[in-house]
């Protein structure tokens, strides 16, 4: 491989010194515009001082950097190239090794540099006594928990304390017992004080309430009018004799023959009877007729605002037909009429009663009281336009027709 020859240096322009006499002529020539070398220059307007400005402008440095030439090794480097290398790549100080930054360990024994032996050196026992030991860090204290202890732990601690005190006092069986309090029965009081004590004890005693009144309860099962269940056809009614203080929740659980998944609902007139109520809250007499149904049936009637009457199960007017004794075969053929009875202007839902035209006013009143749960009430009468109707008169005598509204007097709303 042939060695590459070293390039020759670029020749520098020679500077010729002109006589001072030509300086004036040079300046005069610069002021004059040179002749146009191109025809286009005639049509371009130039600044008259542009030639002077271009001549005074210094030559810019070449953007090309110095090129490093490869040496063939035959000739030595010139001093200019060495200086150029120093300017381009200055030397940097090398970092010190890591062991120079480590502090000296006092536990390490001094080793003589003159001794070249590599045998291990045995140190004395007291060599490390003078070395100060670093203090141990303080243990971090645990923060107090804000969560209260569970209740069962409190009970366990209380039981342990109770057993400890019990064992402590039961260890000494020979200790003297505390004197017993003198019985109050042994103290004889004066007659006046004894009377006062008796009255105080009588007033502080809890009164005993014993209500022995009962009511004959007739419960009629109402099937769904649109979609009855198959098992509802076998249910008819239930008859009970219960106390007036018996809750309706217990009465509802007394109904037999129902599926286990059915929770019956009790209703009286247009009201639902809840488990906490009692027959005494209805202000009824000795008889009470209520209805039982499923939840779906109850929702069906509530949506349509229909009033259930006990006439679906047992018509009260029919019960009083035989009691009147004045009906014959001809009256049995006659049709019944419906009367709407209300207790006052505030009664927005009148009670309907179906009776025969030859029924007496007393029979109509008895049917109304039995249907509303007020059987046996006295002082009740019927009024039309403010006039009382006679008890012995019949419905036909009073000119009452089907659907007439009659006022019931003698009942407080």
Image (cartoon, helix red, strand yellow):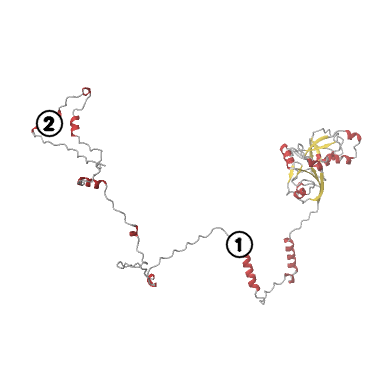
Task: Residue 69: give x, y in percent of width and height.
Answer: 24, 42
Do callouts 1 and 2 mark residues in contact (Cβ within 8 Å)? no
Q: Nearer the viewer, residue 285 or 268?
A: 268
The crowd level at tag 2 (other Cα within 10 Å; few <14, some 14-19, many 20+) is few
- Residue 219 in picture, x, y percent from top left: 80, 45
In the image: residue 227, left or right of residue 94: right
Q: CA distance from mark 1 to mark 2?
A: 118 Å
- Which numbered disc covers residue 96? none
**What residue occupies the far bottom of the structure in this picture?**
174
Left or right side of 154 for 366 = right
User: From where the camera sits, is residue 286 visible?
Assistant: no
Q: Is residue 308 placed above or below 129 in the rendered structure?
A: above
Which residue is the extreme one toward the front?
1
Give the residue drawn at x 64%, y 72%. Answer: 169
User: Secondary structure under badge 1?
Assistant: helix
Q: Quadrant of the N terminus?
A: top left
374 and 13: which is toward the camera? 13
Badge 1 or badge 2: first in the primary sequence: 2
Give the residue number, with chain letter if any, for mark 1: 153
251 or 94, nearer to the observer: 94
Q: Which residue is nearer to you in this view: 158 or 274?
A: 158
Relative image position of residue 108 (x, y in whole percent):
36, 66
Quick check: can you spot residue 126?
yes
Q: Residue 381: x percent and y percent?
A: 81, 40
Could you say whether the residue bearing mark 2 is in a helix, strand or loop?
Answer: helix
Residue at 62% from the left image edge and 60% from the top image edge: 152
Q: Which residue is mark 2?
A: 26
Q: Residues within 10 Å of mark 1 (few under 14, many from 20)?
A: few
When the figure is inspected, residue 87 is found, relative to residue 14, above or below; the finding is below
Residue 284 drawn above or below residue 384: below
Q: Quadrant of residue 394?
A: top right
């Amino acid at each position: 491989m042939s060695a590459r020859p070293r390039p020759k240096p670029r020749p520098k322009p020679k500077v010729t010194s002109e006589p001072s006499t030509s300086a004036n002529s040079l300046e005069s020539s610069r002021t004059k515009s040179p002749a146009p070398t191109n025809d286009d220059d005639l049509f371009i307007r130039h600044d008259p001082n542009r030639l002077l400005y271009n001549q005074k402008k210094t030559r810019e440095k070449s953007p090309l950097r110095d090129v490093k030439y490869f040496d063939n090794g035959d000739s030595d480097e010139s001093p200019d190239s060495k200086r150029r290398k120093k300017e381009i790549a200055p030397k940097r100080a090398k970092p010190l090794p890591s062991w120079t930054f480590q502090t000296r360990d006092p536990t390490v024994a001094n080793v003589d540099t003159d001794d070249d032996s590599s045998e291990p050196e045995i140190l004395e026992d007291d060599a490390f006594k003078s070395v100060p030991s670093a203090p141990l860090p303080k243990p971090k204290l645990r923060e107090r928990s804000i969560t209260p202890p569970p209740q069962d732990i409190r009970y366990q601690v209380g039981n342990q304390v109770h057993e400890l005190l019990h064992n402590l006092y039961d260890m000494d069986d020979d200790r003297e017992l505390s004197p017993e309090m003198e019985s109050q029965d042994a103290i004889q009081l004066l007659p006046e004080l004894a009377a006062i004590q008796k009255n105080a004890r009588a007033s502080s005693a809890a009164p005993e309430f014993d209500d022995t009144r009962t009511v004959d309860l007739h419960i009629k099962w109402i099937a769904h009018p649109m979609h009855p269940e198959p098992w509802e056809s076998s249910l008819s009614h239930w008859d009970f004799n219960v106390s007036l203080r018996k809750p309706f929740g217990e009465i509802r659980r007394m109904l037999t023959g129902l599926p286990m998944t059915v929770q019956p609902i009790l209703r009286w007139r247009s009201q639902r009877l809840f488990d906490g109520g009692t027959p005494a809250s209805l202000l009824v007499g000795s008889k009470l007729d209520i209805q039982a149904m499923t939840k779906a049936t109850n929702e069906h009637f509530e949506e349509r605002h229909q009033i259930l009457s006990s006439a679906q199960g047992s018509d009260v007017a029919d019960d009083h037909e035989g009691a009147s004794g004045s009906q014959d075969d001809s009256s049995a053929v006659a049709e019944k009429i419906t009367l709407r009875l209300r207790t006052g202007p505030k009664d927005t839902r009148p009670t309907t009663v179906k009776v025969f035209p030859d029924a007496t006013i007393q029979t109509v009143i008895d049917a109304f009281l039995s249907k509303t749960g007020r059987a046996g009430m006295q002082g009740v009468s019927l009024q039309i336009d403010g006039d009382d109707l006679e008890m012995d008169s019949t419905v036909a005598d009073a000119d009452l027709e089907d659907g007439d509204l009659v006022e019931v007097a003698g009942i407080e709303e």
